[in-house]
Amino acid sequence: MTRPKTVIDKIWDDHVVCSDAKGDLLYIDLHLVHEVTSPQAFDGIEHEGRRVRRPDLTLAVEDHNVPTDSLLIRDPMGSAQVERLRENCARHGIEHFAHGDERQGVVHVVAPELGLVQPGMSVVCGDSHTSTHGALGALAFGVGTSDVEHVLATQTLRITKPATMAVEFVGTLPAGVSPKDLVMALIAEIGANGANGHVIEYRGPVMREISMEGRMSICNMAVEAGARAGLVAPDEVTEEYLRGRPAAPSGSRWDEAVAAWRELRTDDGASFDKTVRIDVSTLTPYATWGTNPGQAARVGDGVVPDPATFTDPGERAAAQRALEYMGLAPGTRLRDIKIDTVFLGSCTNGRIEDLRAAAEVLEGRRLANGVRMIVVPGSMQVRKQAEQEGLHEVFTAAGAQWRLSGCSMCLGMNTDRLTGPARVASTSNRNYERRQGDHARTHLVSPATAAATAVAGHLAAPQHLDGATT
């Protein structure tokens, strides 16, 4: 009798070329490349006299270094990295989306919207948030520069198989609670290292109700809980998202693909190495108060904790350091924390659904005095769709800046990096010290909470606007 398998095991086992004491050699179906982690990898294969093994399974996108206020890359280092990517792609025959191309954007937004990522695939990129693609039922994870070189040369990757973890969201999802809030609540519960060494399958009736864009937000932040990757088994939501996309199967091949995808689910009786259950029924919007994604609390009634209340010495020290960096005192209500900068975008929350959620809050409202907000679509296709829907007019009427696509303020590798003191409400995925600038203090929030915060001038969820007591 065949042993019941998790969907994680099924996809992994389907891609094992061979195994030995060092781990498994996995075949890689799609290799995503950007300008930051690829130059040394290309140098490595060329030094050995090699060519890219499967350029047809490789896609390069400019995203980390590109500015979002113009097509001119003003930073010398960023310009050099982008130029190297262009040269390498031309030399090896790799499809490449340059800054200004209508298909360009953040690589983790671009690949799914083209239909390049499909259930059952293995996907890697020299970027930790490759886990995003797990939302489509793929095994997707970030790799280091030496691994990028190995995949370029062989289309395989040597890796030790991680453990498996089930995260079950149960209960009834309250109105106003977003997928970003779900994953932030999870990380607050288990900690920023709570899934270390695991691949997560997000499960439960709540996940069936969540859109593909929302699933991408949740899988994107699997790595913020320490996981190697996160995924959702494919279902009708997956099929409808992929139907008709440029790289998706069509005709009889579509029917064959769907039949195969429907087999990609965890068998009854399969066991996980670890299981976590989160009852979503009492959740509200979340925001971080510290310097890792696990240091978070509810926006409505949450307060900055006292480090002395942490029983674990490591957590106590981390909380104390976080409060010193963030300039916050224990007992401060999250809704009393004033914000001067708001960033809406990134591979976590730069999709059309995210822009719609923020625009709904901003409609007919203005940013608070002294608040700067930049809105960065996750791709040029998202930007185009948003403009067709008139969302950009809502943002600009409220006083926000409407930008081109790129990683932008998510990380300090481009001209959107903050150069002076700032307290930021950000829809990105990391709030580490100096992540968005040497003097930036980052609070992670959902798109709707970001918009409400921009209007209020302090951390706030939409239900706190329009004269609500603060």
Image (tube, rainbow, N blue to C red):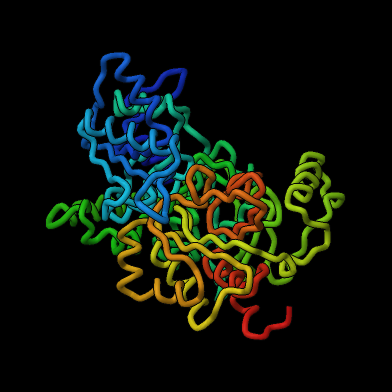
Q: Quadrant of the C terminus?
A: bottom right
* Position of the N terminus by quadrant: top left
Residue 45: image location, x then y, percent: 32, 20
For the residue pair 272 and 342, the one nearer the viewer reads as 342
In the image: residue 328, left or right of residue 27: right
Q: Residue at x 40, y 25 (%)?
A: 40
Q: Residue at x 73, y 82 (%)?
A: 469
Query: Does residue 264 show up?
Result: yes
Q: Residue furthest top?
A: 48
Displayed quadrant of residue 61: top left
Q: Nearer the viewer, residue 143 or 420?
A: 420
> On screen, 186 above or below 41?
below
- Residue at 60% over, 67% down: 371
Where does the image place residue 129, in percent across and percent down from the top left? 47, 45
Relative depth, front residue between 156 and 46: 46
Q: Is residue 420 left or right of 403 when viewed as pictured?
A: right
Query: At 33% from the left edge and 59% from the top edge, which residue is drawn?
Result: 238
Report which quarter residue 284 is drawn in.
bottom right
Q: Position of residue 391 (x, y in %)?
A: 39, 73
In the image, 142 versus 17, the foreground residue is: 142
Indicate the quadrant where residue 460 lies.
Answer: bottom right
> Would residue 191 be visible to someone looking at this image?
no
Furthest toward the right, the residue is: 308
Is 23 left, or right, of 174 in this rendering? left
Vertical side of 390 occupied by 204: above or below: above
* Residue closest to the far left: 251
The x, y position of residue 154, in whole percent, is 29, 24
Q: How many marks?
A: 0
